[in-house]
Amino acid sequence: MNDINRTLAPVGVFDSGVGGLTVAREIMRQLPNEKIVYFGDTARVPYGSKSKNTIIKYSKQIIRFLKTKGVKAIVVACNTASAMALEEIQPETDIPILGVIKPGAKTAVEKTKNKRIGIIGTEATIRSNIYKDIICEKDGSVTVVGKPCPLFVPLVEEGWIKDPVTREVAKRYLDYFRQEDIDTLVLGCTHYPLLRNTIGEVMGESVTLVNPAYETAVSLRALLQEKNLAAGNEHRYEGNMYDFYVSDTADKFKHFANSILPFHIEDIGQINIEEY
Ligand code: DGL
């Protein structure tokens, strides 16, 4: 592939399902010249309660699929897959791969003043201790406290974003941080940025919320520039900038996507991911 064709190639973004659309949405907003191929593993979601080996196997299959689409870089939009599989999958491909954990962890370290950071995520992400490890590598004087909030994912998928039930669940989970005196909280799961207002209200103004989706798009820009892969304005694509694929029926995905993306999507490809 020559240099221009390489810059014109799409960025692959994948998640266990719909949640990674929060990351794709940020990339669309911050890097409007980049074409995206998004894959949501709707047949095998959730990843948050699965084992490391299973998540590595799934992630490898998805990378093989994305490669068939000629992607120039891959964003692992799923916190759980970034936590469990990134290290294993990275050496297997020559395509640059970016996860969501490092960018979120870096920002949390920059934001905290009292050096006490909270992390919320799936059970697998919190159990992996990866946020803690990366944060403490950057600054050993920081204390990190993690809390899994598994009910947030189905609540978001049900569309209960501003709902008294969700608020009550948030209060129950986040009460855990009351004695911890954190001043920064990382929204360490794809779905949580959609609950930002509720989480912010429960935590209060003294706590800064870090959205790894935003930080990942910032890091992707830097990565593409560093590798001379960034698409320029002059190379703007004709036709579809964004392609979406799922591993199960597309209806629920389409409904969710159309509720959070700034444009309407109609065509979603369904593939058998087990073939990859
Ligand atoms: N995408 C997952 C994450 O960010 C949440 C949903 C799941 O458990 O698969 O951790």
Image: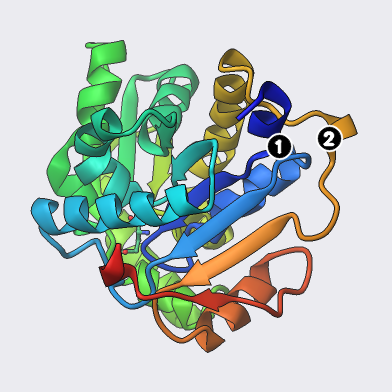
Q: Quadrant of the C terminus?
A: bottom left
Vertical arrangement, residue 239 with respect to residue 108, above or below = below
**Disc on res. 44:** none
Where does label 2 land, which residue?
Answer: 235
Q: Is residue 68 left or right of residue 269?
A: left
Number of marks present in the image shown: 2
Vertical arrangement, residue 190 with respect to residue 168, above or below = above
Disc 2 and disc 1 in contact, CB within 8 angstroms: yes
Q: Position of residue 236 (x, y in %)?
A: 84, 41
Q: Are there few (<14), some (14-19), or many (20+) residues within 10 Å of tag 1? A: many
Q: Secondary structure at mark 2?
A: helix
The kind of residue on which mark 2 rests is: His
Please tell me in which quadrant of the rendered image residue 70 appears.
Answer: top right
Residue in the picture at 29% in, 69% down: 275
Q: Position of residue 35 (x, y in %)?
A: 69, 47
Q: Quadrant of the N terminus?
A: top right
